[in-house]
Amino acid sequence: MTKKEKTPRQLKVQKTIQRVFMDIFSKSSFELKNKKIFVNILSVDISPDLKNTRILVDIFDADEKYKKLLIKQLNTNYLKQLRRLLSQQIQLKYVPELIFVLDASQDAAIKLDRVIEEEASNFSS
């Protein structure tokens, strides 16, 4: 079964939500263990009814433990505040529910690069 293509309205709302959160996170950072951590919005996916939004994020300068902790905090502690900030920037009948998801593809690519480099060094030895 194939996914339905996004409507122009969905695409416009997705783009606007992504822009709003990119602005929010570019102006702020999170601090864990006296280290600043930056959040980057990679993509936004909104449901056809515009009521649910999945936001794919990448977190810089943090190990896996802190990335998961920050995602949990974004989905619980900061959620009301982030929805309020979104509602001030976007005109919709309903402010969509937000779900922040950590992008694991970059970590997988880094691990794959390490394995390839290790195998290459073993092969050339």
Image (spheres, rainbow, N blue to C red):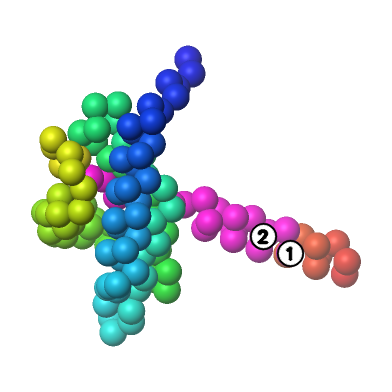
**Residue visible at 26% across and 45% down?**
99
Residue 30: x, y in percent? Answer: 27, 73
Within the image, what quadrant is residue 28 found in?
A: bottom left
Callout 1 crowding tier (Cα within 10 Å): few <14, some 14–19, many ≥20: few
Query: Is the C terminus in the top left, top right, bottom left or bottom right quadrant?
Result: bottom right
Residue for badge 1: 117
Query: Are discs 1 and 2 less than 8 Å apart at CB?
Result: yes
Q: Three-letter amino acid code at disc 1?
A: Glu
Q: Which image quarter: residue 24?
A: bottom left
Residue 50 located left or right of residue 26:
left
- In space, the residues marked 1 and 2 are separated at their CA atoms by 6 Å
Q: Residues within 10 Å of mark 2 (few under 14, many from 20)?
A: few
Q: Which residues are magenta?
A: 98-117
Residue 113, numbered circle: 2
Tell me residue 68's x, y (percent).
Answer: 32, 59
Query: Where does residue 18 sit, x and y in percent of width and height?
Result: 35, 51
Q: Is residue 34 above or below residue 83?
A: below
Label 2 element class:
helix
